[in-house]
Image (spheres, rainbow, N blue to C red):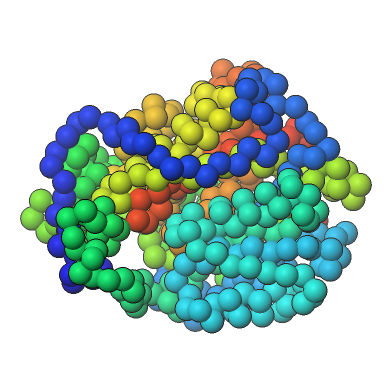
Amino acid sequence: SNPKNKQNRPLASSSSPILVPTHTHVACLSHTPSSSPNTMSRSPNDVVILTAVRTPLCRARRGALAKIPPSTLLSTVLRGCIPPSIPPSCIEDICVGNVLAPASGYAMARMAQIDAGIPYTTPLQTLNRQCSSGLQAMNVIATAIASGQIKVGIGCGVESMSSHPMNKVTPPDVDWEVMKEDRNEEAMNCLIPMGVTSENVSSKFGFTRSQLDEFATISHQRASLAQQSGKFSEEIIPVAGVTADDGIRAQTTPAILSKLKPVFDPENGSTTAGNSSQMTDGAAAILLTTRAHAQHLQLPILGVYRSFACVGVPPSIMGIGPAVAIPKLLNDAGVSTEDVELYEINEAFASQAKYCIEVLGLDTNKVNVNGGAIALGHPLGCTGARLTVSLLHEMKRRGVHNRGKEGGGTAGRRLGVVSMCIGTGMGAAALLEVEDGPWRQSSL
């Protein structure tokens, strides 16, 4: 954070939910806003997902990927997401989400593409929408496909927080005298450290330290069970002999977490290293095309990319982003929270994730069922893509098309939501659908 920023104290407590006017960017790709939950029809022009893969997620600086450059992480998933039946030259565009790399990160991504066997004739772009970058990259490709600009593309994300740690980020180039004027208080709030925004959420909405530690424990427990049962192996492409996530702490308990000291408000704070997301290295990639082209290639469809929404929220409580983005997303799609079978909501901090789940009235048994970023980690530019990978694999594994028989959701619905908060005060969300029928990624 910049030392000139004095807006670093938690907000006053309040138990009332935040309802904020939002500026939105929304794409509804395969249906009209008036669609009912049971009438999302299949179209040859649907944007569909063929494959979704990720690297292991490993702790920054101390983990198994700490010495692996981001180019290797990225080339691994780019190579791994292309089935043998698709020549790499058929990929028409690649969009890479990345947050912390310097300007030369663009060359890193382009070199990784060529190293992955995708020829120079395929163009590539990078983008930075902070924690939603990987999801935004997928939306860029999906929108290009929906508009007919391309037929096949890859949306992906990569972050090496070992190579480019957050504490090396330089302050923004702004006119500080102008920004410190009273009218620019919200602008200055964009500089509030993320951990302080977590404390703001805890203070404003009345969360206790014990509640946040309990939330974090559940994240580790779920991730540990998923890892032990081999669930993650279905979505992971090994890198340099590394095959598994290494940030999961199976023995974590609230009692253990209670011994950690608050980081951002030592006297009264509730946010600790134990109930916050881990700094992590990783990459993920999603291959998209149209339904018609997938059928032409005789390739199974993993999922359908239905819609996307991005909204703005107060920078000082940026973590509430999903609580605003998800309603916008679902309202535009004409579905309710109950119609959604599974949610992947990024656990930047236990405070903001818990707030979003509670204010939306979500069933906790539908959210982050295999753990979240507190256990697995949050490689900033990768996270949006990683959440998509994990959601689609879990939905396919569960056979979500049969969930209606078990009393969960609307019979026949196969919907999932990915969402995250975004630094400086935003939230993003995407609506995905899983199709009936078998699907195997082992052919990759």
On screen, residue 150 versus residue 309, left or right, reads right
On screen, residue 206 versus residue 421, left or right, reads left
Q: Quadrant of the N terminus?
A: bottom left
On screen, residue 429 versus residue 355, left or right, reads right
Above or below: residue 226 compared with residue 329 = below
* Rendering quarter of residue 222: top left
User: Number of callouts in the render?
Assistant: 0
Q: Residue furthest left?
A: 267
* Rendering quarter of residue 241: bottom right
Residue 70 location, x and y as percent? 55, 75
Q: Quadrant of the C terminus?
A: bottom right
Residue 138 location, x and y as percent? 62, 54
For the point 19% across and 40% down, the residue is 204
Which sits in the foreground, 314 or 363?
A: 314
Residue 346 location, x and y as percent? 44, 48
Residue 3 location, x and y as percent? 18, 71
User: Can residue 394 be seen in this snapshot?
Assistant: no
For the point 64% across and 63% down, the residue is 95
For the point 41% across and 53% down, the residue is 422
